[in-house]
Image (cartoon, helix red, strand yellow):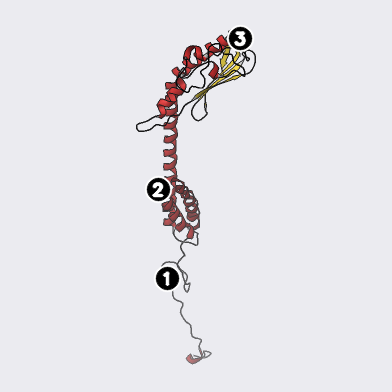
């Protein structure tokens, strides 16, 4: 045909193949995503903390690290993330979460049980404390009356009048008529074996095959001519009862704790 170049001079057209069915552009080279280190760390720390908690409870705290790495791993392996290993991150997060919930539950049960035991022990001690308190206040009033209405030095040793000479080696045993030369103390008012608080604690501390005896104590602090503070404590020094004596002569006192 006139005006048409010969076939040998026509440009050659190379057909373009259609794109693959999965929608990936032709010629794009794909590479596998590297596994997230945070996801691996989450699973390792979670499992290690869970197992370690049975043998050494402080080691169980590493599950918190596993929980943090798990959350970071989930974020890093999301749909738009550049790392793989979402399953590892999810597993580590779930294990760490369950371990934390378990520790919280066990701790709550322990605290509840300990508090219940303390309440029971205090309830058992109340009669002994009340009886000791009444005896000490009675002796304190007697000392006050026999010492010219004063809690200062010069009053009689009342402990020996009811406790006798006491067991051998008793350091508080004195002859009748002996006067208190210094600050009034509880040993001047009551003798060995008269107070139940120490004996009660000793009985509670002793168990089968044990000779350990832990005693609570009463402490008397004279604050003035007619005023004082009376305090009962347990074997650890915790205050069980505290009485503020404003005027022993009038019987004016209140329980402050």
**Do the numbered discs 3 and 1 sit on residues whose CB atoms are within 8 Å?**
no
How many angstroms separate mark 3 from mark 2 (CA)?
64 Å
Label 1 sits on residue: 20
The residue pinned by badge 3 equals 147
- The residue depicted at 61 percent of the width and 9 percent of the height is 147
Q: CA distance from mark 1 to mark 2?
A: 56 Å
Q: Secondary structure at mark 2?
A: helix
The picture places residue 236, in percent across and down from the top left corner, at: 50, 30
Q: Is residue 249 visible?
A: no
Q: In the rendered image, which quarter is residue 254 located in? A: top right
- Nearest to N terminus: mark 3 or mark 1: 1
> Is disc 1 in contact with disc 2, using a CB cutoff of under 8 Å?
no
Counting residues from the N terminus, which is met first, the one under dot 3 or under dot 2? 2
Between 227 and 39, the one nearer to me in the picture: 227
Number of numbered discs visible in the structure rendering? 3
Q: CA distance from mark 3 to mark 1?
A: 112 Å
Say which residue label 2 marks.
55
Vertical order, 174 against 146 (above or below) = below
Give the residue at x 43% y 32%: 114
């Amino acid at each position: 045909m006139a005006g048409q170049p010969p076939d040998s001079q026509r440009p050659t057209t190379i057909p373009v193949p259609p794109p693959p069915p999965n929608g990936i552009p032709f010629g794009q080279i794909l590479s596998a995503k590297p596994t997230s280190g945070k996801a691996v760390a989450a699973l390792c720390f979670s499992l290690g903390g869970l197992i370690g908690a049975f043998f050494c409870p402080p080691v169980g705290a590493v599950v918190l690290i596993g929980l943090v790495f798990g959350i970071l791993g989930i974020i890093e392996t999301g749909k738009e993330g550049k790392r793989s290993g979402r399953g590892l991150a999810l597993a580590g997060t779930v294990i760490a979460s369950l371990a934390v919930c378990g520790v919280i539950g066990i701790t709550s049960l322990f605290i509840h049980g300990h508090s219940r035991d303390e309440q029971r022990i205090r309830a058992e001690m109340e009669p002994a404390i009340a009886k000791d308190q009444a005896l000490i206040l009675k002796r304190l009033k007697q000392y006050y009356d026999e010492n010219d209405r004063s809690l200062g030095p010069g009053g009689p040793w009342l402990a020996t009048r009811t406790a006798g000479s006491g067991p051998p080696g008793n350091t508080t045993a004195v002859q009748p008529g002996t006067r208190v030369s210094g600050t009034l103390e509880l040993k001047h008012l009551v003798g060995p074996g008269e107070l139940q608080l120490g004996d009660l604690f000793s009985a509670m501390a002793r168990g089968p095959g044990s000779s350990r005896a832990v005693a609570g104590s009463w402490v008397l602090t004279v604050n003035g001519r007619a005023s004082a503070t009376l305090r009962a404590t347990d074997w650890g020094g915790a205050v069980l009862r505290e009485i503020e004596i404003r005027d022993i002569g009038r019987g004016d006192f209140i329980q402050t704790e």
